[in-house]
């Protein structure tokens, strides 16, 4: 699984031949943006979704990692997974412990699908914070306002969130900094006080306003980072990772704080703690991290820098431990300029993660498909945005595949689009127990056809939700029926298409009809039309 910014977790299959294949990352704070720390290894022949023996593995480590696959002269495979040894010599003193990252793996004798379901169940019970608890639907202001907002604009957006029926309003970047106001990405990081020119009544007033309008309030932070144009940098230039006697190396106009320094750890913890203590009712944090480490050198470590990469990650965990000891159940989204941090080492502190900054729904089908192999749907954040030229329905149906949110200008929706969106939120809340906790079956891969089809089935096999996405079918391309999976063969199920625009009627012959589970799994359903970039969502209810 490889990728880039806005193109995360793209799948690639290759044969392991004699020698050593290494997959690794040396990026430090944003380790997964090019290589994602997860893999499948087929044990005899290439495994597919439902057939074949394989091992699926991932590393619970929010830092540099390395997977080494060695096929020896006897055609035996050895796998070594762990911290990347690059620039990371660690001398273990007598009596001192060193805990290596957990390598999490599962065996499947029934292809990738069973391996994914194993991971999803484990993650819900053990791997992700509060995996058994409901998640919040939300409206984010970023793509509507970017940095340009004030209290009246936000109050109007609260009204939009209320119209949609979402649970929470999330205020993104741009709310902080006074001497160096955060009106763009060139200043303010590190100065975590509400900007008086935008928010004269502070964050607490926004929390109260949101509460009065029937929703929770959350906020964006990037506490590991700093702009040189900030009060924090003026006061503590020695708190930054940078090589001495060399020019500072900026990425997105920012530098990385030296989190190895206990004083910096206190600062980051106090940043989060102050937000909660000064703003009672604050209900959600989006924790971002928009740059990797370059020219990394810790003033705190001074001479010997060989433990920098390891110590940074362990220091991050120390801070997150402190936060979770005081605020054990506050929902927090893990973000790193998209999917730059997607690992189970971090997710024991976070309830969910931002999958990608690319919210074009066509691209998101592939990105979300990739994450689904190792992460459960309730942890993968998808937002309906204005990216791309696809219909609102297609954008919405793609986002509904996992944890649904919104990041678009509700004022620009037509009356029918607003009615549609409100109905979708209602449908999602009703069906979210199936989507979040049901077994996932990937039925048609976008890597194999010009469409993607998947479904979730609850544990009782009494209810299912099926998502079908047409991508770019050829002219007059005919798709075969799709055989469903995971149902009770002896039970009858009613098929209902949902998420229809006002006045629109389903064109699918199976709509409102009932069939046995055996029929649906052996004969299948016609769930794909012929129009490019179109979609359908079906509720499958047991009788």
Image (tube, rainbow, N blue to C red):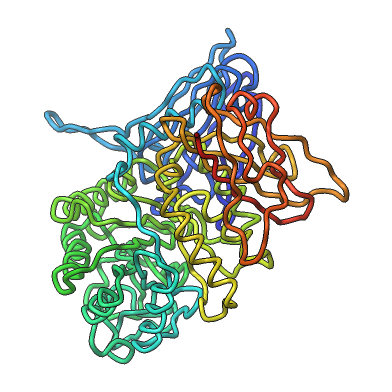
Across and down, in percent, residue 99 comes to: 24, 33
Nearest the eye: 342 or 352: 352
Q: Is residue 543 above or below residue 399?
A: above
Q: Is residue 251 left or right of residue 175?
A: right
The residue lying toward the viewer, choosing from 436 and 90, is 436
Residue at x 32% of width, y 67% of height: 221
Instruction: Please tell me which residue is depicted at 27% across the width and 80% down the height of the picture.
Output: 209
The residue shown at (57%, 49%) is 367
Residue 64 in percent (x, y) is at: 41, 44
Quarter of the rendering containing residue 375: top left
**Residue 249 drawn above or below residue 478:** below
- Give the total number of marks visible in the rendering: 0
Q: From the top left corner, tell me how far across and down residue 427 is, in percent.
A: 47, 55
Between 183 and 477, the residue placed more toward the observer is 477
Is 169 rendered above or below residue 65? below
Instruction: Please say if 93 is above or below 142.
Output: above
The residue lying toward the viewer, choosing from 391 and 509, is 509
Q: Position of residue 234 (x, y in %)?
A: 26, 79
């Amino acid at each position: 699984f490889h990728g880039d910014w806005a193109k995360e977790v793209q799948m690639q299959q290759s044969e392991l031949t004699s020698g050593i294949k290494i997959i690794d990352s040396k990026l430090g704070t944003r380790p997964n943006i090019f290589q994602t720390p997860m893999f499948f290894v087929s044990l005899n022949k290439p495994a597919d979704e439902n057939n074949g023996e394989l091992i699926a593995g991932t590393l619970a480590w929010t830092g540099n990692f390395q997977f080494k696959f060695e096929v020896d002269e006897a055609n035996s495979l050895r796998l070594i997974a762990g911290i990347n040894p690059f620039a990371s010599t660690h001398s273990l003193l007598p009596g001192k412990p060193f805990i290596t990252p957990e390598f999490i793996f599962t065996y499947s004798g029934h292809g990738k699908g069973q391996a994914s379901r194993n991971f999803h169940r484990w993650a819900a019970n053990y791997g992700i914070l509060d995996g058994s608890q409901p998640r919040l639907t939300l409206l984010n202001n970023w793509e509507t306002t970017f940095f340009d907002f004030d209290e009246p604009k936000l109050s109007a957006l609260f009204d939009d969130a209320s119209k949609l029926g979402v649970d929470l309003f999330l205020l993104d970047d741009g709310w902080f900094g006074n001497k160096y106001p955060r009106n763009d990405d060139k200043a303010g990081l590190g100065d975590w006080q509400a900007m008086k020119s935008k928010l004269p009544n502070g964050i607490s007033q926004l929390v109260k306003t949101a509460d009065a309008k029937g929703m929770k309030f959350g906020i964006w932070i990037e506490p590991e980072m700093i702009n040189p144009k900030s009060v924090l940098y003026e006061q503590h230039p020695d708190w930054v990772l940078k090589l001495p006697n060399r020019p500072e190396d900026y990425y997105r106009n920012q530098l990385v704080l030296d989190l190895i320094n206990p004083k910096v750890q206190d600062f980051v913890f106090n940043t989060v703690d102050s937000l909660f203590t000064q703003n009672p009712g604050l209900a959600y944090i989006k924790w971002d991290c928009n740059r990797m480490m370059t020219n990394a050198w810790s003033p705190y470590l001074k001479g010997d820098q060989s433990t920098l990469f390891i110590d940074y990650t362990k220091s991050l965990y120390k801070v997150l431990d402190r936060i979770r000891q005081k605020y054990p159940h506050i929902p927090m989204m893990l973000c790193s300029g998209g999917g730059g941090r997607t690992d189970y080492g971090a997710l024991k502190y976070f309830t969910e993660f931002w999958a990608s900054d690319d919210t074009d729904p066509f691209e998101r089908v592939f990105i979300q498909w990739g994450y689904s192999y190792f992460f459960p749907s309730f942890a993968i954040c998808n937002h309906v945005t204005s990216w791309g030229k696809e219909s609102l329905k297609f954008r919405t149906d793609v986002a509904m595949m996992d944890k649904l949110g919104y990041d678009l200008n509700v004022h620009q929706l037509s009356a029918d689009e607003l009615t549609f969106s409100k109905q979708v939120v209602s449908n999602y809340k009703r069906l979210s127990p199936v989507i979040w906790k049901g077994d996932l079956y990937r039925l048609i891969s976008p890597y194999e056809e010009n469409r993607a089809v998947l479904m979730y089935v609850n544990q009782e096999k009494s209810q299912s939700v099926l998502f079908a996405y047409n991508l770019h079918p050829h002219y007059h391309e005919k798709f075969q029926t799709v055989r469903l999976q995971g149902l009770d063969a002896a039970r009858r199920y009613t098929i209902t298409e949902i998420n229809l625009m006002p006045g629109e009627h389903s064109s699918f012959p199976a709509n409102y009809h009932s069939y046995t589970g055996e029929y649906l799994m052996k004969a299948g359903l016609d769930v794909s039309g012929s129009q490019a970039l179109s979609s359908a969502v079906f509720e499958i209810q047991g009788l």
